[in-house]
Amino acid sequence: MAPAVAVIGAQWGDEAKGKIVHFLSREADFCVRFNGGPNAGHTVVDGYGEARLHQIPAGALHPQCLGVLAHGMVLDPWALQEEFSALKAQGRPEPKIFISERIHLILPYHRLREEKEGMADKLGTTRKGVGPAYMDRVGRRGLRLLDLGNEEYLREKVYSEGQYLGKIEPETIIADLLHFRREFENRVGDAQVLLAQALSAGKRVVFEGAQGTMLDVDFGTYPYVTSSTTTVHGIPVGAGVWPEFSAVIGVAKAYATRVGAGPFPTEDHTGLGEKLREAGREYGATTGRPRRCGWLDLVALRYAQKVNGFTHLALTKLDVLSGFSEIRVAVAYRVRGRRVEEFPAAPWELAQAEPVYEVLPGWKRGIQGVRDFEDLPREAKEYVRFVEEALSVPVALIGTGREAEALIVSWEPWS
């Protein structure tokens, strides 16, 4: 089997995975999304401008790389067409994609159901209908892409949602879906077979995770999680192949953020948190919501490392910390008076956790765009080494800006 690379969010999502995937896919043949849907927001800044990707894999922006939307995702056909239109408006070449025929579809009534059940208010969901679509999939009520080939079945499924059809014209939904099938029929097929053959033939494959480990439906801060498997375990489930990985890369910001409800031990409620938000432009690529910001949490990162078995770490947005006189890093928690170094599974314990910080010296000089580790200030280099030692994992990639080229690379991914 050919080596493959997995890119997994190590925090609560929004770790700049799109930037890392885009870099790794420069020499890849395939880039595979295996979980999530339009609730993802992967941003790439290159010569064409800023691309905000929600369902198209970030690697598909490279002309030689085929983006695969595997069956572990849920697909919004309307949003996918809008995404193609936005990329075309930037003057980009049309991305090459291949969609699993087994992928489940997000329909307009899924968004209405999400609103009616108050998921966005209770859990901080993105209002994209992702949760209800996954619920239908597990409940064996879903509509798959291949089902569009049976118009009678399609009509039955759409009309079965009678309680929502007062707000939605069912014939419009059916017509739109049949149009989508005609427009994309040459890009649909058995993605599992495609990927299995590609790996056997020695092709280079990047697996692009959406959201992050702490939002995983099983390993995350349940119930404040997403609806899919966001860890490395989601790859065989969501893509149908069992690759031999040359690297499993955990992507983490040099600080921490979270969107929506749920425990977040290192969240900063002072002006420092606001400073991080503004310096890092911490507003959701999907919803535009301001992200909750705080300091790096090594307890959570060690947990993510144990769950995923990271071989390398990508530490992004290091440049955002420039200008802080000191930088805090949580090395443990204090829960009901006792020191805890393992990440609690119970959300009420995590909500009570008070971070135990180690304070490191900051640096004043800006590092935006730096591409050589030795050009970093001494304090920045010490910060990176501190993280490496704490996790016993090498930091192979360091983000020093939003642009694709603002990256320090100390590892050859395809060697």
Image (cartoon, helix red, strand yellow):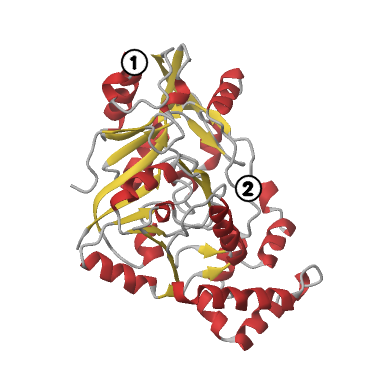
Question: Please, what secondary structure does the residue beneath circle 1 have?
Answer: loop
* Three-letter amino acid code at the position of disc 2: Leu
Name the residue carrying label 2.
123
Residue located beneath label 1 in the image = 377
Q: Is residue 63 left or right of residue 291?
A: left
Which percent across, then down, holds residue 334? 47, 25
Residue 30 picture quarter: bottom left
Q: Position of residue 330 (x, y in %)?
A: 43, 25
At horizontal 80% and vertical 67% (from top left) the residue drawn is 167
Regarding residue 27, the answer to whether it shows in the image is yes
**Residue at the image position 66 percent from the left and 84 percent from the top:** 156
Q: Nearer the viewer, residue 378 or 185?
A: 185
Q: Who is closer to the viewer here, 256 or 344?
A: 256
**Marker count (numbered):** 2
Labels 1 and 2: the sequence-earlier one: 2
The residue carrying pointer 1 sits among few (fewer than 14), some (14 to 19) or many (20 or more) residues within 10 Å by Cα, namely some
Residue 252 x %, y %? 41, 36
Cα distance in 3D space between marks 1 and 2: 40 Å
